[in-house]
Image (cartoon, rainbow, N blue to C red):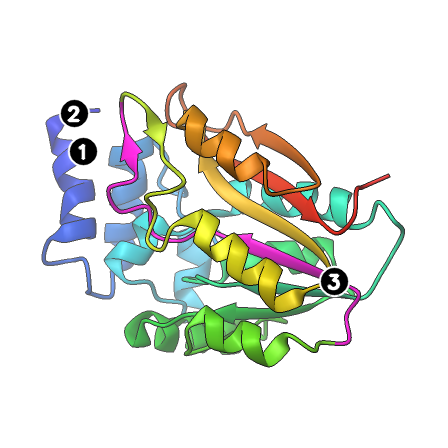
Amino acid sequence: MSHHVAYDRGLLLHGAKRNSVLELWEVERYGTESYGDPDYVSIYGLPPRDWYVKGIRLLGRTAVECTRDELADAIGRDIAAVATKPGPVPSLVIDPFAGSGNTLYWILRHLPEARGVGCELDTAVFQLTARNVEALSLPVTVVNSDYLTVVSREATAAEDLIVAFIAPPWGEALSKDSGLDLRRTQPPIPEIVANLQHAFGRKRLLCAIQVYELIDPDSLAELQSGFDWSALRIYDLNLPGQNHGVFLGTKGWVPN
């Protein structure tokens, strides 16, 4: 990655543009300079030029951190493949850190009978996402609340299967040497999983955790030990060393 590209990404993540609503040319420039693709930040099934004309807007940090369509679609497909192993069952999908809500949107596309709730504590991100979802009439509910409050409210949900997509801010958790330490995300992923398992008790739980292709092995082993069944999928969508994936783990059941 060139220094110019690194600066451009840093500007969106940490600089003046972090909390600013981006113009279309800025979204496309980020995609071009960082990944060689002006359509890189495709969300809700639309390339930037199409979602922008429909009134969709993103903050700089959301454009960098959101799960774009190609990845969100792959994650949604793998979640659905596991969630439907016992046969179609009523499902509740919870995204504790919804951001743009794009991954939740794709999960629900692959689980069309499910009910979905996204939690977004950041008011600025929530307001834009809520407006985006409304503008496109998406079947996504996003609430301006922390996930613990929502999980507590949904603890007695009627659905037989709870699906949780877990992608908290990585912060300092990603190291170029040891990879993503799942214990150092904000909040730590094992803590989130423990809270979900406690809240939903004996209900069947499927956790889908967004990961990086290089993962700290000790943190991965610790995570795996808390599930009855687990699998790891890495998607070959970017250059080697820049790919994301999903860790799938079930509690209270094992896929057939």
Residue at 61% x, 54% y: name it.
106
As displayed, is residue 134 above or below residue 171? Answer: below
Q: Which residue is mark 3?
A: 202
Kindly check if marks 3 and 1 are in contact, taking CB atoms under 8 A apart as contact.
Answer: no
Residue nearer the viewer, 180 or 3: 180
Residue 57 visible to the viewer: yes
In the image, taking residue 74 as reference, residue 180 lies left or right, namely left
The amino acid sitting under disc 1 is Val
Residue 149, horizontal then vertical, whole percent = 48, 77
Which comes sooner in the sequence, label 2 or label 3?
Answer: 2
Question: Would you call the spot at circle 2 few (<14 residues within 10 Å), some (14-19), or many (20 or more)?
Answer: few
The answer to which image quadrant residue 75 occupies is top right
Q: Which residue is mark 2?
A: 2
The amino acid sitting under disc 3 is Arg
Q: Which residues are magenta?
A: 158-176
Q: Which residue is mark 1?
A: 5
As displayed, is residue 36 above or below residue 31? Answer: above
- Asked if the stretch drawn in magenta spans residue 84, the answer is no
